[in-house]
Amino acid sequence: MAVDLLLGLQWGDEGKGKIVDVLTANYDIIARFQGGPNAGHTLEFDGIKHVLHTIPSGIFHENAINIVGNGVVIDPVIFRKELQNLEKFDLDINSKLFISRKAHLILPTHRLLDAASEAAKGKAKIGSTLKGIGPTYMDKTGRNGMRVGDLELESWCDKYRSLANKHQAMISFYDVDVQYDLAELEAEFFEAVEHLKKLTFIDSEEYLYQAQQAGKKILAEGAQGSLLDIDFGTYPYVTSSNTTAAGACTGLGVAPGNIGEVLGIFKAYTTRVGSGPFPTELFDEDGATMSKVGNEFGATTGRPRRCGWLDLVALKYAVQINGVTALMMMKADVLSGFDSLKICTAYKYRGKTINHLPFNIESDNVTPVYTEMKGWKKDLTRMTKESEIPETLNQYIEFLEGELQIPIKIVSVGPDRKQTIHRSK
Ligand code: GDP
Ligand code: IMO
Ligand code: MG
């Protein structure tokens, strides 16, 4: 059975958590393939809001197995807090949450290195979530990292010590003011590691291979979004992993030929948290309305998200890179009430009109070219049926489908599981 992928097509926070939760009913296994606790995936049902950072978004479904894949980086301290938040829901975690032995560990000193690196960059900082993501992936590709499977070896403490010592020397190299009490951080880390060791570690590529052979339905859950991809995003203002479809192959050990549907998820407008170019960013009333109605604050850091119109040039690029086969449009309800809506269909770049992302995308060298569409006034949040979708929203959807040549299968009209319209067209 092929493995389906679900990934964000913008700068993250598209609503992946909600949709994975909605779709889990159709799957046996949900497997996260990259990123770490820089992610914040929000799910809402029965009047309760849950935010997950490392744990896959299928965890609340009774029969689904959830796997943290080899491409993910895990901070035992944050992981422990996530598990503590789940305790009251009686989820039988040990029988439904498995962790890849090949996933890398975020050490306390990785977080400190992240802070030092950002402080050293000053105004040019990436706007990292400061969860230690960059330094951990650097140790992975530098072949110095510590993996979950190392915790099963007697010598793991020695390995930890020599890596942490090296990190401390690197922190002083940065020559910036990063205050820390390593003894305190380590006490918390070692305690959290003991908790992590109580969970089930697996060779996830083997587990997933056997599951495919047995005909299990598997959904791979991405974190971040395509425009934050280390290769194809708005570099250097990106994260440190491949957030695009190929990341699922390396982050889970799934062969490219065994990928089935590629489900691409996007907001009906655009948001971005952290630094970096954002051609359609709004600094006016319209942007403020999106921010307020959409409650656009980061699920991990609480930082306000920058808001702007939908950027179809960027979206087309993401659809292309990922080979998206079906689309899901989120937060349509947030655009209710606008008289007219803008969609960026091209950029003016160095005197030319272009339809692709240029190498050097800067907000001040790219001017969006907009198509204007009529808005819709109706409150969408109680709608559940395709037939209820207002005419002008249908025009918005059909315009996007025409441009992207991919069907929009789901329109989301609120944060709750139930606020989801499935389209058959
Ligand atoms: P993720 O990182 O892609 O999982 O997305 P986040 O959870 O970081 O951010 C999405 C936010 O939008 C969360 O607060 C969700 O509860 C919320 N959300 C998801 N879908 C909708 C929707 O259709 N309408 C509204 N108003 N909120 C939504
Ligand atoms: P989810 O999975 C939105 C952004 C950060 C920063 C850049 C690098 O919830 O969509 P990092 O901590 O990786 O070094 O930060 O990437 N970023 C996200 N933005 N959603 C996310 O995840 C993000 N994860 C990282 O704000 O600009
Ligand atoms: Mg998020």
Image (cartoon, helix red, strand yellow):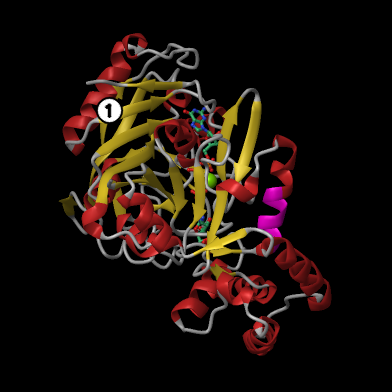
Which image quadrant: the C terminus? top left
Q: Is residue 55 left or right of residue 281?
A: right
Quadrant in the rendering for residue 208: bottom left
- Which residue is painted at 73% across and 76% down in the image? 178
Most foreground residue, 177 or 139: 139
Query: From the viewer's perspective, is residue 157 above or below residue 78?
Result: below
Whether residue 92 is visible, yes or no, is: yes
Most foreground residue, 243 or 332: 243
Asked if residue 146 is among those painted magenta in the image, a careful observer would answer no
Question: Residue 316, position in %: x, y?
Answer: 24, 45
- Which residue is painted at 33% across and 50% down in the image? 212
Query: From the viewer's perspective, is residue 193 above or below residue 313?
Result: below
Question: Residue 319, position in %: x, y?
Answer: 25, 46
Predominant SS along the magenta part = helix
Whether residue 303 is visible, yes or no, is: no
Label total for image: 1
Mark 1: amino acid: Glu
**How crowded is the residue under tag 1: few (<14 C-alpha within 10 Å), some, or many (20+)?**
few
Is the CB–ligand 1 distance for label 1 below 8 Å? no
- Which residue is painted at 42% across and 44% down in the image? 281
Element under label 1? strand
Q: Which residue is mark 1?
A: 372
Q: Is residue 408 left or right of residue 138?
A: left
Asked if residue 79 is among those painted magenta in the image, a careful observer would answer yes
- Which residue is painted at 35% across and 57% down in the image? 209
Name of the residue lying farthest toward the front: 214
Query: From the viewer's perspective, is residue 58 above or below residue 149?
Result: above
Q: Is residue 137 left or right of residue 404?
A: right
Q: Is residue 323 left or right of residue 128?
A: left
Question: Residue 130, position in %: x, y?
Answer: 62, 64
Magenta residues span 77-83
Question: Residue 217, position in %: x, y?
Answer: 36, 42
